[in-house]
Image (tube, rainbow, N blue to C red):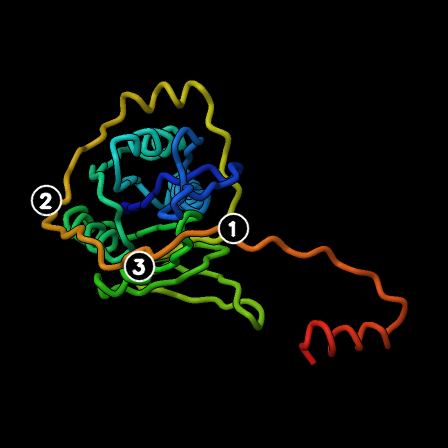
Amino acid sequence: MKALVAVKRVVDYNVKVRVKADGSDVDIGNVKMSMNPFDEIAVEEAVRLKEAGKVSEIVAVSLGEKKCEETLRTALAMGADRAIHVETDAKLEPLAVAKMLKTIADKEQPQLLLLGKQAIDDDANQTAQMLAALLNAPQATFASKVSIGDGEVTVSREIDGGEETLALKLPAVISTDLRLNEPRFVKLPNIMAAKKKPLEKLTPADLGADTAARLRVVKVSEPKARQAGVKVADAAELVAKLKNEAKVI
C-alpha cells in the first residue's frame, strides 16, 4: 500500500507573527520556518503504519518555493521514502493545492492520502476536503485514530457529541488532528540519510495547474488587545456589569 502525505512550510509555531507596517500581509522575513505541525502528525502516522506493515511506501509532497525542500527533507528523515516538490513562488490557495495534489495522486495511485487538518498560517481547513471531492474518494477529517484493515481504513474522530468511528473504502483521504500521535524526534543519522533519498522536482505547468489567485487580501491587522478583567464583590454586581457595561444580558 502506498501513502501520499502532503506537507507545508509555515512559520514555526513558537514564533510570534508580526504584521507588515503597510498591513498588506504577515512579515515572514528572517523568521524560523518549520513543517506545519498537523502535517508532521500526518507524516508520523504514515511512518507508524509502515512500521506496522500496513504501508509499503510513503511519498511526501510539498508545493511552494525552493526552501520547501527543507521541509521535505525533514519528512524524509522522519521515514518517508521519497519526495515530490512542486516548485513555485506563487501564493497558493487551497483549491490550487488540491488540484495539483489530485494530479499527483492520479499519477502515483496511492491508497491512502494523509494531510494535516489545517495549516497554522491560513487556518483554512479546506485542502483535504477539496482533494477528496476532486478524487471522488471517501474522506475522514480530524482523525484521532487510524487503523488499516482489508481494503478499508477505520478512523475515529472527535465530534461535538463525543467520538465518531468511520469505515472508509480505500483509496481514502484523511486529515489528521492533534490527538492522533506525537511526532518523533528526528535523529542526526536519519537527517544525513534523508539527503540521499530521491526528491523529484515539478512545476505547476507540469501538472497543468492554474495558480492564479481567486482571493484578494484587503487588510491584515493585529487582533485588538484584550482589556484587563475586573473583580466583583458578589453575583449582583456581576449581573449589573454584564447588563449595564458589557450589555450581554
Q: CA distance from mark 1 to mark 2?
A: 34 Å
Q: Position of residue 196 (x, y in %)?
A: 27, 21
Label 1 element class: helix
- Residue at x 36%, y 50% (from the top left corner): 115
Q: Quadrant of residue 63?
A: top left
Quarter of the figure with residue 89: top left
Q: Residue at x 47, y 41 (%)?
A: 18
Residue beneath disc 1: 178
Residue 74's disc is: none
Position of the C terminus by quadrant: bottom right
- Residue 52 visible (yes or no): no
Q: Earlier in the sequence, mark 1 or mark 3?
A: 3
Q: Nearer the viewer, mark 2 or mark 3?
A: 2
Residue count near mark 2 (Cα–Cα under 10 Å), binned few <14, some 14–19, many ≥20: few
Q: Residue 92: horizontal and vertical position, in percent?
A: 26, 49
Q: Are marks 1 and 3 in contact (CB under 8 Å)?
A: no
Work out whether 160 lies above or below 188: below
Q: Going by the image, does 220 lie left or right of 63?
A: right
| Closer-to-camera residue (224/109) | 224
Identify the residue under disc 3: 172
The amino acid type, in three-letter code, at marker 2 is Ala
- Can residue 208 be seen here? The reply is yes
> Helix or strand or loop: what does disc 3 sit on?
strand
**Of the residues shown, which amino acid type is indicated by label 1?**
Leu
Please name the residue that numbered disc 2 is placed on: 205
Q: Quadrant of residue 195?
A: top left
Q: Are marks 2 and 3 in contact (CB under 8 Å)?
A: no
Q: Tag 1: Cα neighbours inside 10 Å, few (<14), some, or many (≥20)?
A: some
Say above or below: 169 vs 209: below
Mark 1 and mark 2 lie on one chain; the one further toward the N terminus is 1
Q: Position of residue 25 (x, y in %)?
A: 37, 46
